[in-house]
Amino acid sequence: KQEVTQIPAALSVPEGENLVLNCSFTDSAIYNLQWFRQDPGKGLTSLLLIQSSQREQTSGRLNASLDKSSGRSTLYIAASQPGDSATYLCAAHPETSRTSGSRLTFGEGTQLTVNP
Amino acid sequence: KAGVTQTPRYLIKTRGQQVTLSCSPISGHRSVSWYQQTPGQGLQFLFEYFSETQRNKGNFPGRFSGRQFSNSRSEMNVSTLELGDSALYLCASSGGTLHGGYTFGSGTRLTVV
């Protein structure tokens, strides 16, 4: 059974700092890994999707990497801003997604606060 | 293009009642999944529908059910509501191949009193 862990559970940083959020998963047989952002009481906004054949994806100030062999993914946020304050979740898509549908396994999330 | 639309946004129900939530996926997406989010359990998978067929099911009691229509819109139903069913219910759609990942709706906040 896939288990996804995110460290740290909470992070508070001053504006402008670069930071790294960590995600680890126990079963390396994943199809892809997706990072989401969730604002309080809202739905999930997809940030980055990394296919299992890729090692990283970039979007603006965000960069996500994936190392299947070690069961790890990281989300790097450059030059953080107060508007980045939210909960960040990673989710693993199982390898079986290719043919028989999918159920995402989510981590518990990292609650990020960027202070002005 | 329009995103995933969930209705209603908020619901308050009494224990023992039943409730139906609706989800309209992104146009062209045939896969719709449902998740329950609570502070204690995080995000948990309920079920997935693809082309009107339930393709996957999570570990929830039979009080939780769903269906998908020919236009890919999906509904989930919870019967005999319990206080513990209070949660944010999220719907996600994908193109079926998952190359584009999942797109989530804004959710329905259900409160059972």
Image (spheres, coloured by chain):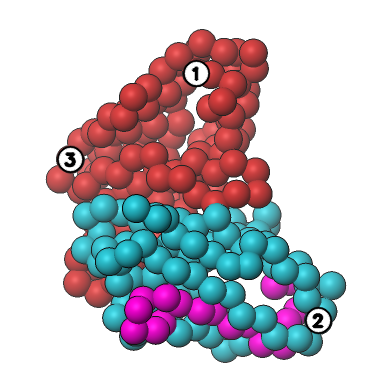
Chain colours: A red, B cyan
Q: Position of residue B103 (x, y in %)?
A: 39, 55
Task: Tell me, yes or no, whether dots 2 and 1 are on the same chain.
Answer: no
Name the residue at 61% across, 87% down.
Answer: B63
Q: Nearer the viewer, residue B66 or A99?
A: B66
What SS does tag 1 mark?
A: loop
> Is residue B27 toward the left or the right of residue A87 in the image?
left
Which stretch is magenta?
Answer: B68-85
> Is residue B64 toward the left or the right of residue A35 in the image?
right
Marking on residue A54: 3
| Camera sees residue A100 | yes
Of circles 3 and 2, which is in front? Answer: 2
Amino acid type at mark 2: Arg
Say which quadrant the C terminus of chain A sits in. top right
Chain letter of the residue beneath label 2 in the structure image:
B
The residue wearing badge 2 is B15
The residue wearing badge 1 is A80
Q: Farthest residue in the front direction?
A: B1
Q: Position of residue A11 (x, y in %)?
A: 59, 27
Crowding at label 3, few (<14), some or many (≥20) Cα neighbours within 10 Å? few
Q: Farthest residue in the left direction?
A: A53
